[in-house]
Amino acid sequence: MTSSTPAYLRGEMRRTDLAWTDWPAIEAFLKDELICRVAVHDEPYPYVTAQSFTFTGDAFLIHSSRFGKLAAAIRANPLVTIEIDRPVALLKAPKGQNTSLEYFSVIARCEVRLRDSTEEVRAHQYQALDKFRPEKDYSPIEDGAASQIVAYRCEIRELSAKKRILADGQYSPPGQPRAPYLRYPFQSGATLSGLPPEAFDPRRFGGK
């Protein structure tokens, strides 16, 4: 984990009470989550796709087929937006407008550095795999596999984060009465920290 707040973190937003600026907590969230949504330029509508990702501190590492729509869109325009969220609980109060959620959310505006040579892709994928396979029990990535994909290093230019958690006093917009919420937590979502220890056992395939 990094020790200081990065210059790209932005805390300005309309609902200042929802701004999430605790960098160590944001960083831990990004390292634990598994799926992001990537929005790219396209016509006539923006194109959005879900991708697994690795957060490095200054970038998001993702990849795709080099022959698909995402690759074509990023080659045409390397500016993308990445979003990651986690719903925490459903909130209900007597008034209909006070039906809401507890959540964490991060939005990053990035510029993509595209890597498509076999060696670049292989190096990128090994770095990305450190998140999912830190035990390093896998065999080398083959040339044939690397030649089928393109790697994207999405370098962060701006990042903003929001959260709404009742325990932090985030009940209602400033100046409005505090709603008497009932809170119904969701079951824990899919995160790295939710996996059992054997998911990272380096001996599972017979290694020492």
Image: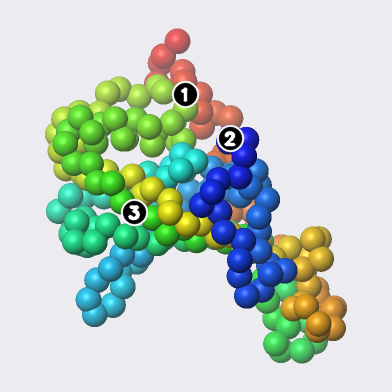
Q: Amino acid at mark 1?
A: Glu
Camera-nearest label, 1 or 3: 3
Could you tell me if residue 90 is visible in this image? Answer: no
Q: Secondary structure at mark 3?
A: strand
Q: Residue furthest top?
A: 208
Identity of the residue drawn at 36% across and 65% down = 39
Quadrant where the C terminus lies? top left
Q: Is residue 105 visible?
A: yes
Residue 108 drawn above or below residue 133: below
What residue did someone put label 1 on?
A: 135
Residue type (three-letter) at the residue carrying disc 3: Glu
Q: Earlier in the sequence, mark 2 or mark 3?
A: 2
Q: Quadrant of the N terminus?
A: top right
Query: Which of pointers 2 and 3 indicates the residue nearer the eye?
Result: 3
Percent coordinates x, y for residue 126 in the rendering: 34, 30
| Residue topped by disc 3 | 111
The residue under label 2 is 1
Q: Is residue 124 above or below residue 179?
A: above
Circle 2: residue type: Met
Q: Residue at x 74, y 78 (%)?
A: 173
Q: CA distance from mark 1 to mark 3?
A: 30 Å
- Hey, which quadrant is residue 72 in on the image? bottom left
- Secondary element under disc 1, as helix, strand or loop, is loop
Disc 2 and disc 3: Cα gap in Å? Answer: 22 Å
For residue 17, above or below residue 25: below
- Compared across the picture, whether 86 is left or right of 51 comes to right
Check contact, mark 2 vs mark 1: CB within 8 A: no
| Picture coordinates of residue 150, whole percent (x, y) | 22, 45
| Comes first in the chain, label 2 or label 1 | 2
Q: Residues within 10 Å of mark 3 (few under 14, many from 20)?
A: many
Depth check: give the residue in front, 180 or 200. 180
- 80 and 180: which is toward the camera: 80
